[in-house]
């Protein structure tokens, strides 16, 4: 890392033109990836990302620069450049740095470099074989294996000086089922803030089988109906709708600009009282957790919506200054190449009193979207459309048959009010979230929920 | 540029008996300024280097990259690429060549872009927001009024003696507007990219972005 005395000189230089605040973020990351296709390892890459980001504030203006050259001379040059982007009125001296190291709740048991490559190769082949053996309809299996160790050092002119190590493990599996000219894909991407023990404890064969089973089930399914009717959205990745259509609008990045439909709704009822939503960066070893955020603040658990009432936003330092809120440990960035902004961590709808059986028996005609797929959301408006990865028809209060090709179309603000039942089977799922400060690991999640009515795109009349 | 680092890699490859390899380096500088509420919202610039190594052993390829260019890091990257090739069991015939006839000069760099004063870029970004807000009272917000530019050097060398590089640059302007009528909010965006700063027309960008947002109001 960099000597404390150099960090102090760089922070002071960045303040030298009257700035209010200066910050330095150093990153040294090693990432290894492997890709399996056609039952062969077709790619294996190792990389080292290394550099420094320097940020200063002039009031509510943020100036950001980064470089790979971490020599004192280069850092002072960059610090001088960011200081000259504006002229401020302050004449501040930095608070002497005091190193604070936080005890991490995210224990790492097996470092990646202690495991032979052959074990990792055998692990992905095991998933591949289980998926292909499930059915002759499986024509292709794609597996992406990833391990990453990110070391960061964060210091600022207010005296903060801390370090963190984040160890990430993830495998993403896509199984493709093929019949005549039809194809369907089943995917899962489990991950954690863990070492190799994550892969060791993962049921590799079950993972391969699950993705294959979903692909085959959807391949042989009838097309989904279209229209407006009740939809039950399954747990885990079902939370992607809340994440995309509501969660981003609760980040100060959009709230501070008035570009959020929730900007002026604090302490008002924005959702059905059965909805409580949480963003929690403290969950041990979860994919979206860290010990400190990328601004050096200890991570927190933030209740966003309590029984339908909007209680908090996700707040980074700059966003908090703009809207008058203390940071919630939500300042995140992909790497030193990005200035931090407010971002989600592990975001989920909390458990409710209902059961899936209650929900299904309450629906005369509707859709059970057991597993959600990808989608898109219009920033600023919350209009969304998401595909259903695994869907079933509900008729007369019973799940009757699998259906494919369904799309859910709606608006984040409206949908929160239409959630009428929430079950107790909360589960999280891992993903990568892209926004202003790059792509960061996040968990989405929810128990199974019931939406009273939503537009469903399909190929058949109801 | 970077002749010393490339020579280090050639020497290290010889030491580790790696016969077939290529090295790709990119060095990028970028700048952007974003305006919100008539003032600077974010101001960014960067100067970064990435170096990638591809090693081919018995028709099997291994990759690595590094952002540290000291000899020790280059050695580590080269050995990682070699090690990665051992993990791969997919053979492909990758032919490395010297390409002596390749055209050296490409018209993809405008030196004038280097000399555009930062104040002019800030002024143009401010115009982006101002014009969009003035175009229609239903345009209530311009979350992104952005001007930026970038310059990149790319260099490639390989074990057959290839050693080429080129530099390119570009600038851009982007507007992202929100239009509101009643309870309904819609967004629209428009961007122009060019190598000539004069092509970045704030009037055209803002009006197109605003128009796109306005046209979506009332759509069913």
Image: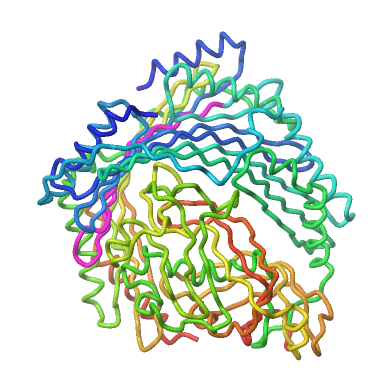
**Quarter holding the C terminus of chain A?**
bottom right
Instruction: List x then y, in percent, for residue A94.
Output: 21, 41
Kindly tell me whether residue A61 is visible in this rendering: yes
Left or right of B220, for residue A179:
right
Q: Which of A278 and B48 is in front in this view?
A: A278
Instruction: List x then y, in percent, for residue A203.
Output: 79, 48
Q: Residue at x 46, y 80 (%)?
A: A309
Q: What segment is highlighted magenta in the picture? A: B32-53
**Is A203 placed above or below A355 here?**
above
Q: Does the magenta stretch include residue B43?
A: yes
Instruction: List x then y, in percent, for residue A440.
Output: 50, 51
Left or right of B14, for residue A373:
right
Instruction: List x then y, in percent, for residue A347.
Output: 54, 63
Q: Residue at x 33, y 36 (%)?
A: B47
**Is B75 placed above or below A355 here?**
above
Q: Which residue lies furthest to the top in this view?
A: B15
Total labels: the figure holds 0
Kindly tell me whether residue B108 is visible in this rendering: no
Q: Which residue is drawn at 83% across and 62% down?
A: A216
Q: Residue at x 60, y 35 (%)?
A: A32
**Quarter holding the N terminus of chain A?**
top left
**Is B207 placed above or below B119 here?**
below
Q: Does the magenta stretch include residue A186?
A: no
Image quadrant of residue A108?
top right
Q: State the predominant SS element of the stretch in magenta.
A: strand
Colour approach in the figure = rainbow
């Amino acid at each position: 890392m960099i000597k404390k005395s150099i960090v102090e000189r760089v922070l002071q230089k960045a303040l030298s033109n009257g700035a209010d605040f200066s910050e330095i973020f150093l990153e040294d990351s090693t990432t290894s990836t492997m890709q399996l296709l056609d039952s062969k390892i077709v790619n294996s890459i190792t990389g080292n990302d290394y550099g420094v980001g320097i940020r200063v504030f002039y009031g509510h203006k943020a100036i950001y620069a980064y470089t790979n050259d971490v020599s004192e001379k280069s850092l002072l040059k960059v610090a001088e450049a960011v200081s000259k982007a504006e002229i401020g009125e302050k004449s501040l001296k930095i608070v002497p740095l005091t190193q604070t190291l936080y005890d991490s709740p995210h224990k790492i048991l097996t470092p990646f470099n202690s495991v032979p490559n052959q074990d990792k190769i055998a692990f992905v082949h095991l998933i591949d074989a289980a998926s292909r053996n499930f059915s002759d309809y499986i024509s292709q299996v794609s597996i992406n294996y990833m391990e990453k160790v990110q070391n960061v050092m964060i210091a600022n002119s207010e005296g903060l000086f801390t370090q963190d190590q984040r160890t990430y493990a993830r495998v993403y599996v896509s199984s493709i089922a093929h019949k005549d000219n039809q194809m369907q894909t089943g995917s899962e991407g489990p991950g954690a803030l863990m070492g190799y023990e994550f892969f060791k404890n993962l049921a590799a064969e079950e993972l391969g089988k699950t993705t294959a089973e979903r692909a085959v089930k959807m391949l042989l399914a009838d097309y989904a109906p279209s229209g407006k009717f009740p939809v039950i959205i399954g747990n885990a990745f079902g939370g992607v709708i809340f994440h995309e259509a509501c969660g981003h609008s609760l980040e100060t990045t959009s709230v501070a600009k008035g570009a959020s439909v929730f900007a002026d709704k604090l302490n008002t009822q924005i959702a059905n009282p059965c909805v409580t939503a949480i963003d929690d960066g403290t969950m041990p070893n979860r994919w979206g957790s860290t010990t400190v955020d990328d601004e050096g603040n200890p991570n927190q658990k933030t209740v966003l919506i309590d029984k339908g009432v909007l209680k908090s936003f996700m707040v980074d330092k700059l966003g908090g200054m703009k809207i008058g809120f203390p940071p919630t440990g939500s300042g995140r960035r992909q790497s030193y190449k990005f200035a931090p902004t407010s971002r989600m961590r592990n975001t989920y709808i909390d458990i409710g009193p209902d059961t899936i059986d209650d929900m299904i028996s309450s629906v005369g005609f509707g859709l059970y979207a057991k597993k959600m797929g990808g989608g898109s959301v219009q920033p600023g408006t919350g209009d969304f459309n998401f595909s259903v990865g695994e869907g079933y028809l509900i008729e007369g209060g019973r799940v009757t048959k699998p259906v494919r090709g369904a799309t859910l179309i709606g608006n984040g603000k409206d949908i929160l009010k239409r959630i009428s039942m929430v079950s107790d089977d909360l589960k999280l799922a891992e993903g990568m979230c892209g926004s202003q400060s790059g792509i960061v690991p996040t968990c989405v999640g929810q128990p199974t929920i019931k939406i009273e009515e939503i537009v469903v795109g399909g190929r058949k009349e109801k | 540029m970077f002749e010393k680092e490339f020579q280090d890699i050639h020497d290290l490859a010889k030491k580790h008996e790696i016969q077939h390899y290529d090295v790709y380096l990119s060095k990028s500088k970028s700048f952007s300024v974003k305006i919100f509420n008539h003032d600077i919202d974010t101001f960014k610039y960067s100067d970064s280097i990435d170096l990638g190594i591809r090693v081919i052993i018995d028709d099997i390829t291994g990759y690595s990259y590094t952002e540290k260019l000291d000899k020790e890091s280059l050695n580590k990257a080269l050995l990682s690429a070699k090690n990665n090739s051992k993990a791969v069991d997919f053979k492909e015939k990758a032919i490395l060549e010297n390409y002596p006839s390749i055209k050296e000069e490409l018209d993809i760099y405008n030196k004038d872009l280097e000399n555009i004063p930062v104040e002019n870029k800030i002024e143009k970004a401010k115009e982006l927001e101002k014009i969009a807000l003035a175009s229609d009272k239903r345009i209530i917000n311009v979350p992104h009024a952005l001007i930026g530019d970038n310059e990149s050097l790319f260099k490639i060398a390989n074990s057959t003696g290839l050693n080429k590089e080129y530099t390119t640059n570009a600038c851009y302007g982007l507007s992202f507007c929100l239009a509101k009528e009643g309870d309904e909010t819609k967004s629209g965006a428009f961007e122009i990219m060019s190598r000539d700063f004069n092509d970045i027309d704030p009037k055209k960008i803002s009006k197109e972005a605003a128009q796109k947002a306005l046209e979506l109001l009332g759509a069913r």
